[in-house]
Image (cartoon, rainbow, N blue to C red):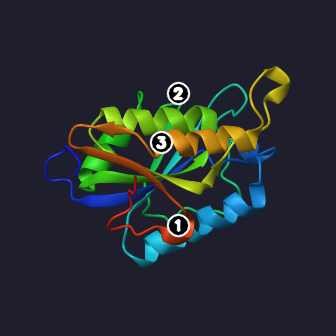
Amino acid sequence: MTTLPDRPRTALLVVDVQNGVMKEAHDRAAVLANIVALVEKAREGGVPVVWVQHTSDELPHGSAVWEYVPELVRGEAEPLVHKEYGDSFEDTDLEPVLSSLGVGRLVVAGAQTDACIRSTLHGAFTRGYDATLVTDAHTTEDLSAYGAPAPGEVIAHTNLYWSFQTAPGRTAGTVKTAEVDFGVTASA
């Protein structure tokens, strides 16, 4: 029910699943297994997989920590969007990529929950996209030493509040990996 005209397709958006980001990620193995399963399911169904890769002082372009984790291999024809901000749309070519693919609905997975995942979900939603978060396919590191809640609580809270997002003409929601249906994914 996207507000973007003539954009009937859904895409899987894989955000920042890079070596440096995932090194200390909460429940890393299970989350990666779920993202791998989502990528395979999308490919089997002819659903576009769009990859997002962050560059920063901590993730220098071309470095080992900047590279995607070895468990995930991008297909040659699958778009790769480079970003420097939390919101994957901000100062990137994500919007033109999605437009060229006819995508108005996003299924989102990756890292980090409390930074780039949240920013990208909100960025998509405010730009008119339907946005579904895969509850068991996103993660974050433990920042409790800095006053943040434990990572499991951050993930649970994000899943909770995203399942209740609303806006005119758009849908948001959450779904588990095993329940993803790239035709209709949002459940509120």
Report the amino acid beneath label 2.
Answer: Tyr
Counting residues from the start of the chain, the first of labels 1 and 3 encountered is 1
Q: Could you tell whether 79 is left or right of 177 in the image?
A: left
* Residue underneath mark 3: 162
Q: Residues within 10 Å of mark 1 (few under 14, many from 20)?
A: many
What is the secondary structure assignment of the residue under circle 3? helix
Which residue is rendered at x = 25% and y = 48% of the image?
Answer: 99
Give how far across and how far down residue 5 sits, in percent.
14, 47
* Residue underneath mark 1: 39
What is the secondary structure assignment of the residue under circle 2? loop
Counting residues from the start of the chain, the first of labels 1 and 2 encountered is 1
- Find the distance from the CA under tag 1 to the CA under tag 2: 24 Å
* Residue underneath mark 2: 85
Report the amino acid beneath label 1.
Answer: Val
Q: Residues within 10 Å of mark 3 (few under 14, many from 20)?
A: many
* Count of residue discs: 3
Q: Is residue 150 above or below residue 56?
A: below
